[in-house]
Structure formats: structure tokens, C-alpha cells
Image (tube, helix red, strand yellow):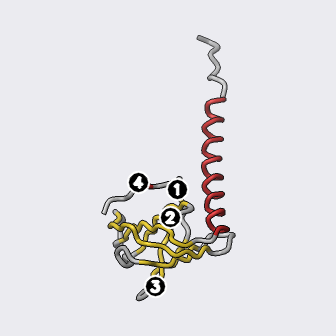
């Protein structure tokens, strides 16, 4: 199934946080590839239920864990060297307001830093033109 790029409401930011994926039959460990206040891309070695309901426990370093309910929207094999790995697109169906706010703040901080770096590059004086 194709990634629903056109339906995203929020920007995503790339983060590598450990995550536990829980289904009614299984538990597997994985890692976030990117997150938004409404969803995440998870990489793991086992594909959770196709289009099934799952729970995620996202372990954010220096912050309390984020517990969300979600729906698998799509999954695909990732090109990794070594063991097979799967990318799983998850849309959050239940997330606390505090956790959603925290994710929005993470995204704003990351994009703010990128924007500040771009501005700093454009504001640098041109190289010294003497000696020409």
C-alpha cells in the first residue's frame, strides 16, 4: 500500500526513539524513524497486524514514555543491510493532549533550528573580494 503523503496534516521530524509495539497477539521492539502529533513511521523486524489496531510505547530519552493507540495504515519492507526490517506507518487514534503537545514542540524546535541555520547562511557576508 502506498504511503498516504497527501493526507498529512502535520510536518514530521526524523527521530530515532526506541518503541514497543503491542498487538493483541504479540509484542515487538522497534524504533521510530519519524513522528508527528498524529502519527509515526516505525521500523521493526516483525510486521504488526496489517491495518490492525496497536499500542505504542515510545521511549523518549529525557522525557516520560509516550503511550498511544494507533492504526497500522501501511507497511513495507525497508532496504537494510542485514536482518529484514519493515517500515510501518501508524496513525494515532488516541494520544493525550500533553503527548501531542510535546511532539508539536519537538517538531517546532527541530524546524526552528533548521530555519535559523538557513537564515545564518544567507546573512553571511560575501567572501572578501579584495585582490581581484
Ranked by sequence position, the earlier of labels 2 and 4 is 4
Mark 2 or mark 3, which is nearer to you?
2
Ranked by sequence position, the earlier of labels 4 and 1 is 4
Ranked by sequence position, the earlier of labels 2 and 1 is 1
Mark 4 or mark 1, which is nearer to you?
4
Q: Position of residue 9 (x, y in %)?
A: 50, 54
Mark 4 or mark 3, which is nearer to you?
4
> Badges 3 and 1: C-beta atoms under 8 Å apart?
no
Q: Is residue 110 above or below residue 118?
A: below
Ranked by sequence position, the earlier of labels 2 and 3 is 3
> Badges 2 and 1: C-beta atoms under 8 Å apart?
yes
Q: CA distance from mark 4 to mark 3?
A: 28 Å
Query: Which residue is tagged 1?
Result: 12
Q: Residue at x 50, y 61 (%)?
A: 34
Q: CA distance from mark 3 to mark 1?
A: 25 Å
Query: Which residue is tagged 2?
Result: 39
Q: Position of residue 117 (x, y in %)?
A: 63, 41
Query: Which residue is tagged 4?
Result: 5
Q: Position of residue 40 (x, y in %)?
A: 49, 65
Secondary element type, mark 4: helix
Secondary element type, mark 2: strand
Residue 123 sits in which quadrant? top right
Q: CA distance from mark 2 to mark 3?
A: 19 Å
Q: Residue at x 47, y 67 (%)?
A: 91
Q: Is residue 22 above or below residue 116?
A: below
Query: Which residue is tagged 3?
Result: 27
> Badges 4 and 3: C-beta atoms under 8 Å apart?
no
Amino acid at each position: 500500500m502506498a504511503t498516504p503523503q497527501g493526507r498529512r496534516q502535520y510536518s514530521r521530524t526524523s527521530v530515532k526513539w526506541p518503541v514497543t509495539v503491542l498487538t493483541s497477539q504479540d509484542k515487538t521492539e522497534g524504533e521510530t524513524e519519524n513522528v508527528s502529533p498524529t502519527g509515526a513511521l516505525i521500523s521493526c523486524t516483525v510486521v504488526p497486524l496489517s491495518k490492525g489496531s496497536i499500542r505504542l510505547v515510545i521511549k523518549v530519552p529525557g522525557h516520560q514514555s509516550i503511550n498511544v493507540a494507533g492504526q497500522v495504515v501501511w507497511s513495507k519492507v525497508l532496504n537494510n543491510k542485514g536482518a529484514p526490517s519493515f517500515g510501518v506507518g501508524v496513525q494515532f487514534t488516541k494520544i493525550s493532549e500533553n503527548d501531542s503537545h510535546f511532539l508539536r514542540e519537538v517538531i517546532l524546535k527541530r524546524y526552528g533550528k533548521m530555519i535559523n541555520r538557513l537564515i545564518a547562511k544567507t546573512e553571511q557576508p560575501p567572501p572578501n573580494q579584495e585582490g581581484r
